[in-house]
Image (tube, rainbow, N blue to C red):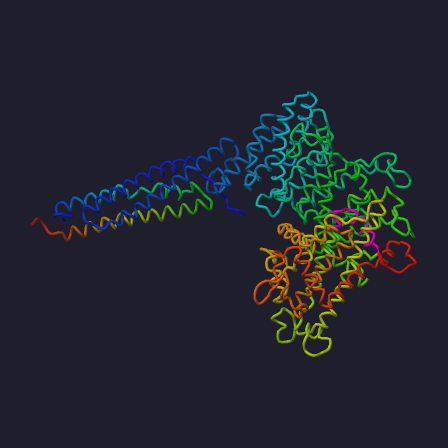
Amino acid sequence: MAELDREAMRAAAQRIQRLSDEHWWALDPACRFMENDAWVGPTGARFDTQVHADQRELRAMLAQAVDSAKQKLASTPGKS
Amino acid sequence: MSEFSGVKQPEFDTMTSKHAQTASRLEELAQALHRELKSAGLDTAPATRLRQLAGRVTTQAADLRRRQRLVHELQRQKVTFGRSTPKGSFLEVPDNLEAAQGLLDGTLAGRAALKAADGDRKALAELQKYASRTGDPEFVKSFLRTLGALGVTRVPGAIAMQLRDAKKRQDAEGVTQLSRQGQKVLGMLSTALAKGTDPRSPAYVGADFLKGLVKEGRAEHKAGDTKYSGYQAQALIWRAHDGKPPFSKEFMEVVGRDVIVYEHEQRKDQWAAAKDPLGRYVKGKQLPIIDLAGAFGLGTLLRPGTQAGSPGMESQSAVVDNLFHAAKSSREASQALLNHTPAGWKESVLDYLITTRWSASRFLNDYKPIRDMLTIATTGQDATSKKLAAEMIKTLSDQISGAFSKDTENLEIKNRYLFDRYAPLGYPLGRAIAANIEQLSELLLNHAAFGKVEAKDMAYALVLATADDAAFEGLVRAQTEHMKAALESVPPVGLNVSNAERLGFTKSDVKQHDRNGDGRVDMDDIQHFLVDRTAAEARPFGFIVETRRQVLIAQGLDDRKANEALKSMVGSALGLLPVPGAKQVTELAKGAFGELLGKGYDKFAGAAYDEIARQAAQRMFEHGRTMDETHAALANDRLAVERLGEQMLTTAMLNKGMLDDLNPRKQTFVTGTPPRLKPFAQMTPQEYSQFLKWARAEGGMNDLLDRFSGTFRRTSEIHDYLDLKVPSSTEGGK
């Protein structure tokens, strides 16, 4: 595929950043409900742990995508 | 103690909705991110991981929805309620979803049952639908807890009453429907009850429930304007039991024992009044407490499998016989009932049932439950089975010995009433003796005692047992296996200290059997020991066959024909089948037995003789061929047993290498090079007959056969025990 020029890369990085911003808190409601004991018991406790881990994973992947876009942007030469 | 589990509302509902939305959003995110990363030439791994994450969250959302549905239903049906804890106000809900479903369904089923107990026909139909849920322990627990011991008692009462009324009205359709529904519901109740009252079952509802069953069992209840005692109704549940799973010993200890004591308390005055000074029931019968179906004239309408309107349905059952039916699926449960002396009683329940209470069993002719229960309780190889077997043998022997005249030439019955009275117990008695066949030898040969049983007691017990055809057959089979095992224990020709271990013997075995001390067990040694064992085994055979002959004569029956089962044992060559786990087989014998064993026969090594005997019979049946043609012409049982003996002794000689010196070449029953015996399973009857003739050419064989016959036919000892006149001519029967 054709390499993106700097402008296109900047726009892409912005879109990726927006996806990250919009979804950063997606799992937060579940986490907070569970922190406030919406569901207690052994299976609930497992769900609590899992959903917190899922939130960490979500954020880690979003951050990773944003970082990789930024790095590429930084190394993309300006308009030739 | 399990942890508390539950949910807070409306937070749980809100979380469930939101999580479903989140799942879709994450799906979309993963797709969008993948597009962006791809078109920018970036690593798409984060998007792939996010797609997996979205999948997990979708599953979580679905689980939450399922849980939410159950929570709502449990709340709507008022099965679960709010509970205050330091963390707030919760709805208690089982942690596991299946358990939650079981709680819900079990409670609803229990409520339907409670309505059915009040006569609600629709509720009864509704209850049927839950019949298949008894596999779920949570269902069973909730069901029984909701219904309670009182409900368990009243449901059969209500069904029986409605059925009685339908019969009275001549409502044939109503009778059919109630019979069918009733059978189903009683079956369901019996499965649930068996599980819920077993401490080892996950469905166990606790000891208080058992106590509740006793309380309600003894209490008086009403169905319409009819009164009945609780046990009469509970009995219908016990009779519906299919054995899966069996009732526990705890159930029998708490409820079962009480039922027996209760009947005695209720009936003892009437029973005393119905007896004459000699203790016989001439002024009335010994009436048991009848179950509710009997009291209402329902016959077998509520027994599983009965079609309303089928013939032979008008019968009655006693409450205790229904109890025995429930007990008989488990050795432990049966033993818990029988091996017990209630407080203040002077006899065990076993003795009570077969003596003091026996006339009540005779009254209804419903023998199958008690016979099955006695059989399973006395035929195990455990200490309690042996104890109960010895007790039963002694008790019945004491009862029956007075039925016969003394000093007659052959056995004569002087008290026919006494003999007929106990005839139905002949089969369980025979099975108990067969399971302890070793004791028969011990009593006769070593004058040991078996519990309180001495040789004379055993003789009379055998009279009663051998009067029953099936019991007689079982005893012959068991002694056959016993003799085979005894012959098997003799070492083979050529045993010495270097090959002992390989052949499954010890060095001390070598020493013991090497009579001339030349370091090797040779043919003379083997012959000596085979003769000894043969004589020892022939005596119990003689006892069994001669008591059978005498009891047939005493009843005026023909003792001159051979029992059909014995003939078929001979015909299918039962005596040839080796002992399971036999130590080793000589080269010559290997060919002969090869196929007879079949698959899995060897796993019976170590089982009780009557179990091996049953399995051997099974093998022969499958084998399905007649090998020994003489069986058709056998004129009586003695000849049949001698023929079996010949089969066994031939096998022993073959196995121990005693026939190795004979030359089998050019015989019809050999095959191949070097010549090997054909497998017995492939020999024709003619070839088998040739084989026996050839084996008899070995001198030792005739000696063994003579010894067997001579000892077997000596009847003076058994005649002594039975107080028969010993004839002045020398011993030996016809």
The quadrant of the image that shows the C terminus of chain B is bottom right
Above or below B157: residue B139: below
Q: Which residues are magenta?
A: B456-473
Regarding residue B384, the answer to whether it shows in the image is no
Q: Horizontally, is B602 left or right of B515 in the view? A: left
Q: Seen from this angle, which residue lies furthest front?
A: B666
Count of all numbered marks drawn on residues in the image? 0
Q: Seen from this angle, which residue lies furthest top?
A: B169
Regarding residue B160, the answer to whether it shows in the image is yes
- The residue lying toward the viewer, choosing from B273 and A39, is B273
> Looking at the image, which residue is at 80% across and 63% down?
B446
Above or below B67: residue B117: above
Q: Horizontally, is B148 left or right of B271 in the view? A: left
**Where's residue B685, x and y in %?**
66, 55
For the stretch drawn in magenta, the main secondary structure is: helix
Residue B440 lies in the magenta-colored region: no
> Looking at the image, which residue is at 44% across and 38% down?
B67
Above or below A9: residue B709: below
Q: Seen from this angle, which residue lies furthest bottom?
A: B518
**Where's residue B378, x and y in %?**
72, 51
Q: Horizontally, is B216 left or right of B89 in the view? A: right
Q: Give the image quarter of residue B644.
A: bottom right
Residue B459 lies in the magenta-colored region: yes
- The residue lying toward the viewer, choosing from B232 and A23, is B232
- The residue lying toward the viewer, choosing from B328 and B412, is B412
**Where's residue B655, x and y in %?**
66, 65
Q: Give the image quarter of residue B675.
A: bottom right
**Where's residue B406, x and y in %?**
91, 51
